[in-house]
Image (cartoon, helix red, strand yellow):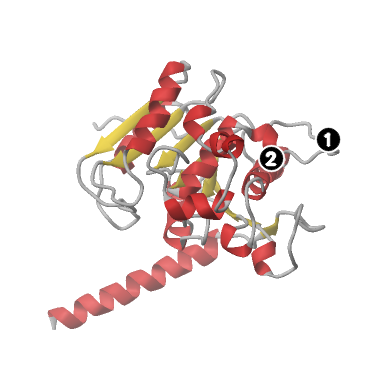
């Protein structure tokens, strides 16, 4: 009997999750209605999208959410579930599904998609009822690398000949077990998918985010685990060291246990509370009401 009840509870939980997703998600927005720059075709893999998730009780802050997947895929476990979790905190969320190396796209295509996403979110802040000065970005693994390039070098992703009245640089950044370096212990698949098999030295350095930090970057929250076998913890440490050297406000959280991809929605991990504490300190979510 208990086993049947547990199965029913699991089915009900899944059904409720699906229902909440359907209620929260808006239809995907085609990022480039006239075709992405350098598009290799017209199929789904050539058409990056931005999917809005609207909270029931918005607080005016927003987050661009960039899932990982080694630049060869989009890991959905880092997309909708986290969008819904951030919705619960009052944030309006936009999930970016960007062009991939597995579809033939190399750097700068991914950065162009991220920059365009920021232009659309901030440029239409009034439509989405968000504060244009409270728009963050959050990315996982290779998505964390894309976040780092977005805050380091947004100018590289701007398409020439187009005028914009807003900045594409986010107001804060969250990097979860990010790929950072294409030089020090690089993640082989991410590197190959982003810059190819034989990149020149200039491109390698340009895409090694620890070498591209500037003093005017927004506040950064990084976390990683010491047991990560796929993307070594040195990636987060290198980026944190570069941020420190340039005087960029940041927090680095290193947790002892957990392999790559730990701390997903539905699991218990201290990084959730650490992030919420940091977001409160930057005015992205309200301060917690003291217990009476």
* Closer to us: 135 or 220: 220
Which residue position is annotated with label 2? 157
Whether residue 193 is visible, yes or no, is yes
Residue with the mark numbered 1: 163
**Foreground pick, 261 / 26:** 261
Of mark 2 and mark 1, the one earlier in the sequence is 2
Indicate whether 202 appears above or below 218: below
**Closer to us: 143 or 78:** 143
Quarter in which the C terminus is drawn: top left
Asked which quadrant contains residue 193, the reply is bottom right
> What x and y, as percent, mark residue 7?
24, 79
Q: Is residue 282 above or below residue 36?
A: above
In the figure, residue 170 lies in which quadrant?
top right
Q: Secondary structure at mark 2?
A: helix
Q: How many marks overall? A: 2
Q: Residue at x 34, y 30 (%)?
A: 252
- What is the x, y in percent for residue 15? 40, 73
Report the residue at 42% width, 43% height from top: 178
Badge 2: how crowded within 10 Å, few (<14), some, or many (20+)? many
Residue at 16% from the left image edge and 80% from the top image edge = 3
- Is residue 59 visible in the rendered structure shown here? no
- In the image, 3: left or right of 205? left
Relative to the observer, which residue lies in front, 189 or 23? 189
Dot 1, crowdedness within 10 Å: few (<14), some or many (≥20)? few
**What residue is shown at x 45% (from left), y 69% (from top)?**
18
- x, y (%) of residue 33? 79, 58
Query: SS of the residue at dot 1?
Result: loop
């Amino acid at each position: 009997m208990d086993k049947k009840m547990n199965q029913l509870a699991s089915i009900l939980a899944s059904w409720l999750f699906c229902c909440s997703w359907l209620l929260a998600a808006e239809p995907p927005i085609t990022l480039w209605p006239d075709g992405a720059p350098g598009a290799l075709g017209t199929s789904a893999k050539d058409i990056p999208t931005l999917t809005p998730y609207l909270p029931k009780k918005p607080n005016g802050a927003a987050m661009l959410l960039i899932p990982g997947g080694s630049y060869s895929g989009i890991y959905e476990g880092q997309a909708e579930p986290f969008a819904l979790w951030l919705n619960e905190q009052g944030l309006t969320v936009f999930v970016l599904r960007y062009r991939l190396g597995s579809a033939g796209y190399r750097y700068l295509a991914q950065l162009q998609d991220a920059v365009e996403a920021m232009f659309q979110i901030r440029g239409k802040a009034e439509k989405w009822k968000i504060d244009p000065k409270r728009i963050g970005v959050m990315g996982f693994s290779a998505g964390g690398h894309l976040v780092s390039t977005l805050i380091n070098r947004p100018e590289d992703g701007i398409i020439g000949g187009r005028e914009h009245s807003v900045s594409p640089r986010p107001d804060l950044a969250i990097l979860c077990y990010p790929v950072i370096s294409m030089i020090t212990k690089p993640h082989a698949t991410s590197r190959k998918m982003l810059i190819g098999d034989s990149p020149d030295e200039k491109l390698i350095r340009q895409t090694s985010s620890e070498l591209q930090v500037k003093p005017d970057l927004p506040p950064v929250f990084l976390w990683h685990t010491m047991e990560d076998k796929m993307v070594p913890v040195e990636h987060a440490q290198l980026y944190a060291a570069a941020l420190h050297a340039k005087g960029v406000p940041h927090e680095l959280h290193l947790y002892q246990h957990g392999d790559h991809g730990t701390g997903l929605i539905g699991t218990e991990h201290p990084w959730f509370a650490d992030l919420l504490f940091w977001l409160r300190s930057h005015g992205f979510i309200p301060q917690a009401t003291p217990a009476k």
